[in-house]
Image (tube, rainbow, N blue to C red):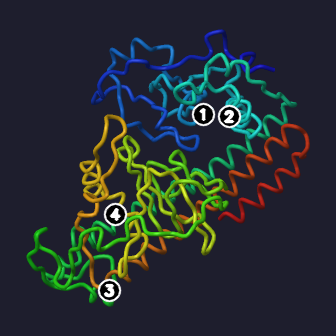
Amino acid sequence: MPLEALLLDNKGIAVGVMYPGPDTLGGVPLIKVGDVKGGLVPLRPSYCISTAVNAEYKRTLLAGDELLITLVGNPGECVVVKQHMVGWNTARAIAVVRLADPSLRVYLKAVLESTACRHLIDAVLNTTVQKTLNLKDIRLLPIPMPPKPVIQAVSHFSNVLNDRVALLRESNATLEAVAQALFKSWLIDFDPVRAKVEGIDPEGMDADTASLFPDSFVESALGLVPFGWRILPLESAYEVNPPRKLKKGEVAPYLDMASVATQGHVVSGAVEREMGSGTKFVNGDTLLARITPCLENGKSAFVDFLSEDQTGWGSTEFVVLRPRAPLPPYHGYLLARYSVFRSHAIRSMSGTSGRQRVQNDVLALFPVVVPSKGVAEAFGDIVGSIQQKITANQDQVKILTQLRDTLLPRLISGKTRLLEAETTIENMLLRSI
């Protein structure tokens, strides 16, 4: 049946706030399309609208029983509204769907995000300016309605798999925060050195690691830096856009800008494509978006998704960064996320409005503090282990997502029985622990 047959009424689908006005402290949280990632939104969006603006858009004020569907960006991505989102509102690029039976929201989300439905959605997108999904096309999407036990099973399995995926992603966010904190403490604020200068033991490390840090500072162009450490321009501390071997026409993993996240080092996926014109990279490289607004939005990635000795390629709008020894590879990604470095990169941009790009010669001058070999290796051991755990978690996310996207449609169509599906999911969840 068409999706519109499941709506609460003729006004059961609507778009949100067209004119949000300025960000308002203490206002009503507004969910923007950029807030939707992997079927989730932040615990509290960063942007708020005034109560006056909110009063003009009561039709999309969330009550806690809706389904949200993105209309641009990644059209068709869904979010099941939770109770903590009650009272929030949504931007115009998001459709708010109210069903006659709200318990069908999880099932409908599973259907809309299935491979088959994704093809249907892609076929009706308006691509005149940017990929856009229209409300009338959402209304007409065909929704299979199997027997109620199957619908309930699909909803249950979808929740179980999505919860595990969300947990893995939360774990990755926590792990990266730990790595970022260590980067700032050791290599920016020099906390262990400051502790030794004051005659106290550095926190959070054993005696052997503490012994690697000097107990004094020297003056430099940047101010005080640890004794024996160097300050080098980025072009000396790093390889910037290093040469990589990949012949034109050779099939290799291709990464576009849309697949790079604004938070976290993992990418949503690379596709096999014949090499044309673009940047080339290998595992251990960091990719930094060099064009507006991608750089300002935070798009950066750490390459960990290739096979051993494989070279990938991607958008021409990436700057490829690779730390030189003794700095470890993950230093590149942590630097790319460092606010001072990003501000330097943004200030270097030039070009016509809307198409400004980072100037590599200016980026190359950014000063990088290079510690002693011992400190660099100790730092690399810790953040390298964190990076590997993040990568392993992301591998599990891919497996669980693939299972969800293949098994649930088979369950809906009757090609897989309930008991078989339950056994498969239980076994996979046990492996992901």
- Residue 335 got which mark? 4
Res. 80 mark: 1
Q: Kindly identify which residue carries mark 3.
A: 373
Q: Nearer the viewer, mark 2 or mark 1?
A: 2
Nearest the eye: 356 or 343: 356
Do the residues bearing badges 3 and 4 touch, measured as CB atoms within 8 Å? no
Q: CA distance from mark 1 to mark 4?
A: 35 Å
Q: Is the N terminus in the top left, top right, bottom left or bottom right quadrant?
A: top right
Residue at mark 2: 109
Q: Which residue is pictured at 32% across the width and 76% down the height?
A: 204
Q: Is residue 337 above or below residue 142?
A: below
Quick check: marks 2 and 3 in contact, CB under 8 Å? no
Task: Tell me the residue at 41%/56% (across/down).
Answer: 288
Q: Compare residues 178 and 75 and report the one nearer the observer.
A: 75
Disc 2/disc 1 C-alpha distance (Å): 8 Å
Q: Badge 1 local density, few (<14 within 10 Å), some, or many (20+)?
A: many
SS at circle 3: helix
Relative to residue 412, is residue 338 drawn left or right?
A: left
Q: Are marks 2 and 1 in contact (CB under 8 Å)?
A: yes
The answer to whether 307 appears left or right of 56 in the picture is right
Nearer the observer, disc 1 or disc 4? 4
Three-letter code for the amino acid on which mark 2 is drawn: Lys
Q: Amino acid at mark 3?
A: Lys
SS at circle 1: strand
Q: Residue furthest left?
A: 219
Residue 188: x and y in percent read 24, 68
Q: CA distance from mark 2 to mark 3?
A: 51 Å
Disc 3 to disc 4, C-alpha distance: 18 Å
Q: Which numbered disc flags the more N-terminal residue, 1 or 4? A: 1
Please give left or right for residue 73 compared with residue 50 in the image.
right
Q: Which residue type carries mark 4?
A: Leu
Residue 405 vs residue 219, the one in the foreground: 219
